[in-house]
Image (cartoon, rainbow, N blue to C red):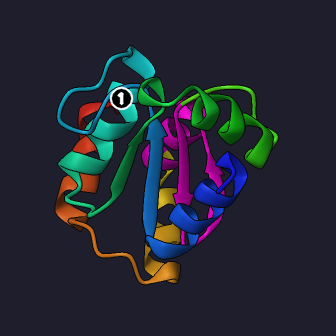
Amino acid sequence: MSAQEKIKQTVEANDVVLYMKGTKTMPQCGFSSRVAGVLNFMGVEYSDVNVLADEDIRSGIKEYSDWPTIPQLYVKGEFIGGCDIITEMTLSGELDQLFDSKGVTYDKDAAEKIREANA
């Protein structure tokens, strides 16, 4: 199975997927840590894929999304963005709206706490 096929299968099989450097419990870069931290704090159940463990996936995910950087967040098969986009969406409430519209469970109070702490 090619890297593209593996990525497609993973993205389609999981409601929320984060392609990142490291894991959700042990991120290995600041940007991955920020996105994983937001998802963890908000109580989102998601699959993490450590791109450092597989060079084919690391380069393949950039082709798959046509996005040059990692981390990359996918929700219900749709590429949402990287660290800056997820940060902006979290602070604006757009991430809450996306999760609501896609039926993804998260802690609304935790999302509000993130916004309050960054106001």
Residue at 45% across / 33% down in the picture?
20
Q: Quadrant of the N terminus?
A: bottom right
> Can you give x and y, in whole percent of width and height, for residue 61 in the image?
66, 41
Q: Where is 51 relative to 43, above or below?
A: above
Residue found at the far top of this picture: 29
Residue at 27% across / 42% down in the picture?
114
Magenta-drawn stretch contains 46:
no
Number of marks: 1
Q: Label 1: which residue?
A: 34
Q: Quadrant of the C terminus?
A: top left
Magenta-drawn stretch contains 79:
yes
**To which quarter of the image does residue 74 belong?**
bottom right
Which residue is at the front of the view, 44 or 11?
11
Q: Is residue 7 left or right of 83 when viewed as pictured?
A: right
Which residue is at the front of the view, 81 or 115?
81
**To which quarter of the image does residue 50 belong?**
top left
Can the viewer see residue 112 in this picture? no
**Amino acid at pointer 1:** Arg
Element under disc 1: helix
Can the viewer see residue 92 in this picture? yes
Report the span colored magenta: 71-91
**To which quarter of the image does residue 43 belong?**
bottom left
Q: Is residue 87 left or right of 46 when viewed as pictured?
A: right
> Can you give x and y, in whole percent of width and height, for residue 112 in the image?
26, 54
Which residue is at the front of the view, 52 or 93?
52
How packed mark 1 is, by other alpha carbons closer than 10 Å (few <14, some 14-19, many 20 or more), is some
Residue at 66% across / 47% down in the picture?
3
Which residue is at the front of the view, 43 or 93?
43
> Can you give x and y, in whole percent of width and height, for residue 65 in the image?
75, 47
